[in-house]
Amino acid sequence: MGHAISRILRVSGSPRRDGNTDLLVQEALRLLHKQTGALLEFVRVPDLRIERCRGCRACMHLGRCAVEGDDFEGLMRRFFAADLFVLGAPVYWLGPPGPMKDFIDRTHGYYRDHTILRGKRATLITVAADSGFEPHEAVMESWLRIYGAGIAGSARVFAREKGEVLRRPEAFQAVQRLVDALTERDE
């Protein structure tokens, strides 16, 4: 039996606005909306003010992050409201870029409850210049799985310069295959 998709959260962890990652995630959302009619929400993590984890460990007692006054909890509410996450992030030295990693680190405050994302699914779109897909995806996937989200698929794309994917049809074909596989499971 498939999963109904009524609300999709698109998250870009790329510091480069309208770069390759943003273009591919936008294409995934365009295709998903066309096929599902789901409500779409978009957020660029680098555009938010998310403080770094301070390592205070107060979250272990609170069950949430102790750092307050930034955009972290607002972004978490968006995750809680969505059925599907389309997460895009380029590879920066074998992992996600700093703003995305800062967000992931801050979710440690929820570590006591490994069910906060249960029943939700995620797709990953990873863009790399020439390598690093495996460790990057390991970070992203382990973060999602620890909180109960399922990985519904991924797409890997080689690109370096801004807009390069626009000249590479295989990049958009990878996203098309990802969306087709996801929506076939939901029929």
Image (cartoon, grey):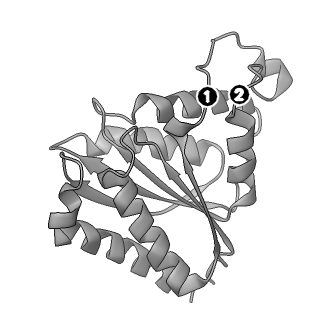
**Residue 150 quadrant:** bottom right
Q: Is residue 60 left or right of residue 55?
A: right
Where residue 76 appears, as percent x and y from the top left, is 71, 43
Query: SS for tag 1?
Result: loop
Where residue 120 appears, as percent x and y from the top left, is 65, 61
Q: Residues within 10 Å of mark 2 (few under 14, many from 20)?
A: few
Residue at horizontal 70%, vertical 27%?
Answer: 70
With respect to residue 48, does 178 lie above or below? below
Of 26 and 182, nearer the camera is 26
Query: SS for tag 2?
Result: loop
Of 103 and 63, nearer the camera is 103
Sequence-first disc among 1 and 2: 1
Q: Which residue is mark 1?
A: 50
Q: Is residue 4 left or right of residue 166?
A: right
Q: Is residue 131 left or right of residue 115?
A: left
Where residue 157 appears, as percent x and y from the top left, is 24, 57
Work out which quarter of the rendered image holds the N terminus and state it.
bottom right
Work out which quarter of the rendered image holds the C terminus and state it.
bottom right
Q: Given the image, on which type of amino acid does mark 2 rest?
A: Asp
Where residue 73 appears, as percent x and y from the top left, is 74, 37
Q: How many marks?
A: 2
Q: Pointer 1 and pointer 2: residues touching (CB < 8 Å)?
A: yes
Residue at horizontal 46%, vertical 42%?
Answer: 13
Asked whether the viewer can see residue 114, the reply is no
Rendered image: mark on residue 70:
2
Q: Residues within 10 Å of mark 1 (few under 14, many from 20)?
A: many
